[in-house]
Amino acid sequence: MSTQPDAALAASTPLSGLSFSKGHGTGNDFLLLADPDGSIELGVEEVTAACDRHRGLGADGLIRAVPSSLVPEGRALLQNNPEAEWFMDYRNGDGSVSEMCGNGVRVFVHFLIDRGLLSLDEGAAAAVGTRGGIKVIERSPDGYSVDMGPWEFIHPEKAAARAMDALVEADGLEVPRPGLSISMGNPHTVVALAEIAELDATSLSAAPRVDPVPPNGTNVEFVVPDDPLVHDGIGQVTMRVHERGVGETLSCGTGACAAAVATRYWAGADAPDHWAVSVPGGQVGVQFHVGPDGREHVHLSGPAVLIASGTFA
Ligand SMILES: N[C@@H](CCC[C@H](N)C(=O)O)C(=O)O
């Protein structure tokens, strides 16, 4: 008889023995790992195994909380922002790295507070490092509000001519639609549809085809502005998203910001600065303010929920 351990009984994940939490923001779900000494090696294999919805815990992405001083991208940020003690190392479910995650950063801060690694009193603000730069976060009536920094057109020359910069095809849509590409630190291409029936008919089980695709790929948001657009001074849009590195998700915070940026741009000078973006997983708020650098910043607010914690077998 063999004395080898049965492969079927061996540890089922490369993250064996590590403690995790699971959380979500409007249904965009994440696994969270605290790595105070920077010892967790995360590669594609570890992330895909953990995020697998059948053989792993299942999640849209995985977030490692590591001291900024222990990663090169974090050390660069600390020079001008010594208060940003923690860095959000964000991975999509397919193991790819992203610059930023708007729902994830709220859940990340909630997790740090839950683990006693950060305190954030009512009315106070905390800075965290991300690959998309420093993000400042505070508590809000719906959970947390994050200064996501300035938005940018990915193709400013096209936007200046009020032109779209891509054609987007998706299953269920009869003809390709024009899209506008916006960076929130990470790339987005926003497509306006006329009505909810069209949004419902769009299939996102395969990635939409974007031509030309922005240099680092893109997340694609399909949005339907309400008619009338503004209720009680707040612009209203409904959105579905196909995320780079994941697939269709129930929500995307940076995507909601890009959707509000694009819809406000299309709506013209009288468009409001405050937006409500409805997604399959709930609703998030987006506001525009001039930041301390004199540029227009996007603020994202919404819930952050922790649902479980445990240890990988
Ligand atoms: N769900 C996130 C965005 C996650 C990263 C994205 N898939 C990318 O690759 O850029 C959000 O809430 O912003």
Image: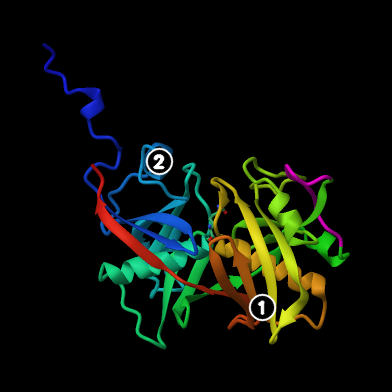
Q: Which mark is residue 98?
A: none
Left or right, 68 with respect to 245, comes to left
Q: Residue at x 29, y 42 (%)?
A: 15
Q: 227 or 100, which is in the foreground?
A: 227
Left or right, 149 with respect to 129, comes to right
Circle 1 crowding by C-alpha within 10 Å: few under 14, some 14–19, many from 20: some
Q: Residue furthest right?
A: 161
Q: Which residues are magenta?
A: 163-174
Quadrant containing the N terminus in the rendered view: top left
Q: Residue at x 64, y 57 (%)?
A: 240
Image quarter for ligand 1 equals bottom right
Query: At which x and y percent is residue 247?
Result: 57, 46
Q: Is residue 231 magenta?
A: no
Q: Residue at x 40, y 62 (%)?
A: 87
Q: Which mark is residue 43?
A: 2
Q: Three-letter amino acid code at disc 1?
A: Glu
